[in-house]
Amino acid sequence: MRSAMRRKTLAMRKLPVTLAFVLLAGTACNRGGQQQTASAAGPAGAAAPQAKSNPMEIEATESLLPRIKIGEASYSQIGASISVAARLEVDETRMARVGSPVMGRITELDVLEGQQVTAGQLLAVVNSTGLSGVQLAYMKALSQEQLAQRAVGRAQQLLDAGVIGSAELRRREAELSQATAEVTGTRNEMAVLGMSDEAIARVRDTRSIDSYARVLASRSGTVVQRRVTVGQVIQSADTLAEIADLSSLWLVADVPEQAAGALVAGQTVEAEIAAMPGHLIHGKISFVSAIVNPETRTIRARMDLPNPNQKYKPSMLATMMMKDPTQMKQVVPVTAVVREGNIEHIFVQTSPNRFLLRPLTLGEQFGNQRVVLDGLRAGERIVVDGAFHLNNERVRLSIQGN
């Protein structure tokens, strides 16, 4: 009995040691497993690297592929063309402004607007006191010249008789030269005031004053404007009428500064008069202004328009179309262009179902095509139609990814 009790006591003493050993063994196993797990995962706290997606690239789904069309940029003959408002004007090289050479009152007016006149035709008569004063000065100068001539003749006789010296003769000759100069000056002044040679000769021969100035047409043409009436007092700088030869007109256009870079004289243009729809006029630019209008930021250009039958009228409105010589240029459809952040892009195919949104530089638009200036190589496959739908899907996926 005592031996059995002793063995039981020894067994109870060994039990804590056994449990402690089992616990230590389990802890070691757990640590080993954690170390193996950590070794397999890498350094503590480090996550496995993942490839980042390009937000400008998209893979088209099976449902999206039927909505897009893939192709290549094409080449086309392109010629820049702009249309600007134009108008018909009188050819200023064929126009004359007729005015009175003297200040006075109009007593006769023989001209109407639209009337055909010939060069030298009487247009108006002006009663002028200024003209009377010049004629009076002319007659005085004539009298002084005659007196000086007689004085020189008498002095020559006295010199020959030995009564006077040569100095006296030279003095009287100088007075004659001065009187002759006054005659010439006043005669020229009358000519400037519009008096003809016949009228001046009449004043010289009759010694009578004619205070009526006659205004004559300086060229043949049509009276396009009459600015005075009978009884009106007119100044020497005032215009009495405007006469123009309407057999040739100017077609004038104010071209915007941005579109006038290639504008040159000799460039072929077409024009259409608003009052004559469907009637095209072909011609060439004859003049391009050397300066820009600072107020309208436009450049004046014009073409000469023959008008033998005068069917075209000054101030008619028109449209002028200017074309540049055609050039072979790379173009893409407007349906292929995507605008993002004020920058134009295009989808380029990188693999059968993947597309990259690439920025590019575009030029003018001609119809439904845009000229490609930079950013696209020949032969690259692009989305030519449906780029809008593809970009919407790209933006949606990008937002979800964020």
Image: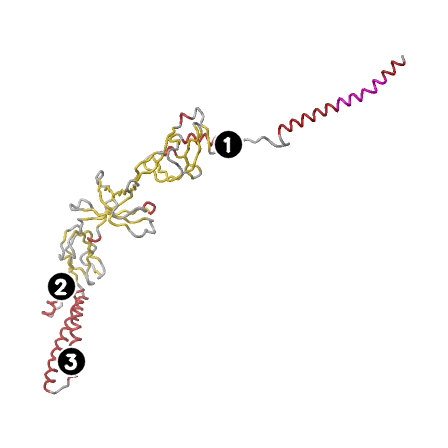
The residue drawn where x is 14% and y is 86% is 164
Q: Identify the residue under disc 1.
A: 53
Q: Amino acid at mark 3?
A: Arg
**Which callout, 2 or 3, points to the residue nearer the camera?**
3
Contact (Cβ within 8 Å) of mark 3 with mark 1: no
The residue drawn where x is 29% and y is 51% is 289
* Numbered circle sitting on residue 172: 3
Magenta stretch, overall SS: helix
Q: Is residue 164 placed above or below 333 in the rendered structure?
A: below
Is 92 or 140 nearer to us in this picture? Answer: 92
> Does the magenta run of residues contain 14?
yes
Contact (Cβ within 8 Å) of mark 2 with mark 3: no
Magenta span: 9-23
* Numbered circle sitting on residue 277: none
The answer for how far apart the CA atoms under marks 1 and 2 are is: 96 Å
The quadrant holding residue 11 is top right
The tag earlier along the polypeptide, 3 or 1, is 1
Could you classify mark 2 by the number of other residues whose Cα lies within 10 Å: few (under 14), some (14-19), or many (20 or more)?
Answer: some
Q: Secondary structure at mark 3?
A: helix
Q: Identify the residue under disc 2.
A: 196
Q: Secondary structure at mark 1?
A: loop
